Image (cartoon, rainbow, N blue to C red):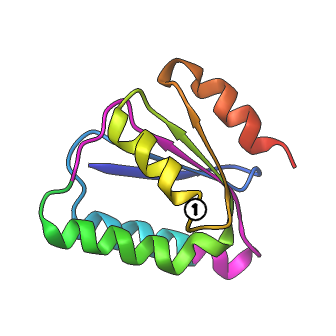
Amino acid sequence: MLDHHFIDGSGVLVLTSDGQLSAPEIKDLRQAVETYLADHKDIHGLLIDAQSFPGYEDISGFVSHVKFVAEFHKQIAKVALVTDAKIPQAAGFMAKHFMHQNIRHFPYAERDSALEWLSQP
């Protein structure tokens, strides 16, 4: 299940998943982001809290995720990838070459440092 919530007053969106990502979960996330952006210029930061990388339920989950990133990446100022998994670390490295955001990887034990970094202007 993909959990998503904004930290009140900070403009930081936190994503946490305890299972494989699915298209309906990405759709729910999309709706939450669209609702937030209707009242805000952008998302100050995105914290991806993934102790391990759960993968995708099926190809539609992957496609939905890629479309979400393509649609919203310019409206997210910073991304903190908090994980000890190797695949997302590589994804974060590659994403730096395709997207304009400031993207940083944090080991899972440094989640608080990631939130602090996202909260800085």
Relative height, residue 94 to residue 108 (above, below): below
Q: Identify the element where label 1 is drawn.
A: loop
Which residue is denoted by mark 1 in the rendering? Answer: 97
Task: Tell me the quarter of the picture where residue 34 sits.
Answer: bottom right
Q: Does 68 appear in magenta?
A: no
Q: Quick one: which residue is furthest to the top in this view? A: 109
Picture residue at 29% right of the left edge, 63% below the top = 25
Which residue shows up at 52% across the image and 48% down it? 93
Q: Quadrant of residue 104?
A: top right
The image position of residue 11, as x and y in percent, is: 72, 56
Q: Residue at x 75, y 37 (%)?
A: 117
* Residue found at the far left of this picture: 58
Image vertical order of residue 55 relative to residue 98, above or below: above
- Residue 96: x and y in percent read 59, 57
Residue 42 highlighted magenta (yes or no): yes
| Tally of marks | 1
Residue placed most toward the observer, 42 or 83: 83
Q: Residues within 10 Å of mark 1 (few under 14, many from 20)?
A: few
Q: At 33% from the left edge and 41% from the top edge, which residue is drawn?
A: 87
* Residue 121 horizontal/vertical position (percent): 87, 49
Percent position of residue 53, x then y: 30, 40
Magenta range is 35-55
Which residue extends farthest right? 121
Q: Is residue 65 visible?
A: yes
Quadrant of residue 40 in the image? Answer: bottom right
Q: Amino acid at mark 1?
A: His
Would residue 8 appear left or right of 54 to someone viewing this image? right
Q: Is residue 36 visible?
A: no
